[in-house]
Amino acid sequence: MNTYQVNTDGYYGAFGGAEVPEILRHNLHELTTRYREILSEPAFEQEYRELLHDYVGRPSPLYHARRLSARYKATIYLKREDLNHTGSHKINNALGQVLLARRLGKTRIIAETGAGQHGVATATACALLGLPCHIYMGSTDVERQHVNVERMRMLGATVHPVSSGSSTLTDAVDAAFADYCGHAADTFYVVGSAVGPHPYPALVAELQSVISAEIREQLMQKIGRNYPDFLVACIGGGSNAMGTMYHYLSENRTRLLLAEAAGYGIASGQHAATLSVGKPATLHGAHTLVIQDSAGHPLEPYSLSAGLDYPGIGPLPAHLVSTGRAEVLAVTDVQAVAAARELTLLEGIIPALESAHALAALPLMQLKPTDVVVLTVSGRGDKDLGTYLAYPQ
Ligand SMILES: *Cc1c(COP(=O)(O)O)cnc(C)c1O
């Protein structure tokens, strides 16, 4: 009995649901009733599995990081999502959703992106399948993430800069929803994390669950048992974390650790520590935890890491934390950058700044020598080199 499955109303415990304008109800209902059956159609499954294998490069390695293990006196394995095509876990989901869109007869793809990683993954899947792609991105982010904007344009996508509010991710999501409302008949909205209205959180977690399915097999081969003592992942909305933990939600021998962005520290008020200090509210179509002011308005989140800079969180991680199934660690910018430098010098792997938050959990955990840890490196750090090199030692 898995109590962590979404219920028929789209809720995980107190979190979730689908609060959307009337005009989108039909699309979400269609997606909810059809996606499971489509994902398990043999022809669909085979095409998706083949692309994950031959195009994305899966299975991603489960790497025994020996020098990192020696440093923390435990056995540490890294799940290498940084080695995927386009450089992060986002492609697993984008490819699955664009295939699903095509199967549903949709002819136009939209998405929103903050740091640009999901935009690049979606534009990549659209180029591969020959579908027109429109990406909404805050104009501040368009400037900050210039290389990813160029990649999307090279891939044939139309990038729409959004200049409203703070001109960042939250505003891009609003613009994508507005587009979706205006083109509901022919458009598919590819949501980039395990957030948004039902069924997206469940769909994204299921598409990303390839990560934990592989971990089970790879651990079995390497250590003769299929579960670790700890699973560690960074969390923005929750897609790499839920993908990493999906097959372990009911495995009580495995502790689940979520590393969220504490920016300059929770006390500073400049952070994105939704699970630590968020309060229930409705954001972007779902009832979840949101960092907000005393009047209940979403607060402008802050993290040095653009991919963790979101005021909300997926309903499943909110539920896992509120029931005590998962534990939260709040990691500051300073701690994350130090962890990225440490991994780079110990293992020759430059992690994404987002993934560095997961690595920063290691010194905060009290590990025993017998502990086996699996930590997901969600992406590679090429996009963050400028930030790392400019950051004070
Ligand atoms: C987008 C992103 C994240 C955060 O998103 P989740 O949905 O929480 O996984 C983490 N790491 C990388 C490399 C990303 O691109």
Image: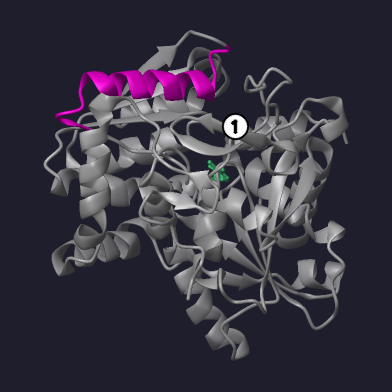
Q: Amino acid at mark 1?
A: Tyr
- Label 1 CA crowd tier, 10 Å (few <14, some 14–19, many 20+): many
Bounds of the magenta span? 166-187
Q: Quadrant of residue 181?
A: top left
User: Is 182 covered by the magenta stretch?
Assistant: yes
Nearer to us in this view, 176 or 61 = 176
Taking 148 as reference, is 65 left or right? right
Q: How many marks?
A: 1
Label 1: which residue? Answer: 310
- The answer to whether 205 is drawn above or below residue 25 in the figure is below
User: Is 111 covered by the magenta stretch?
Assistant: no
Q: For the point 80% across and 75% down, which residue is it? A: 74
Q: For the point 43% across and 68% down, which residue is it? A: 59
Q: For the point 39% across and 61% down, which residue is it? A: 57
Farthest bottom residue in view: 224
Tell me the element at label 1.
Answer: loop
Would you say the magenta stretch is mainly helix, strand or loop?
Answer: helix
- The answer to whether 57 is drawn above or below residue 134 in the figure is below
Q: Position of residue 73 (x, y in %)?
A: 85, 74
Q: Position of residue 338 (x, y in %)?
A: 82, 45
Q: Position of residue 13 (x, y in %)?
A: 54, 54
Judged from the image, the quadrant occupied by ligand 1 is: top right
Nearer to us in this view, 378 or 9 = 9
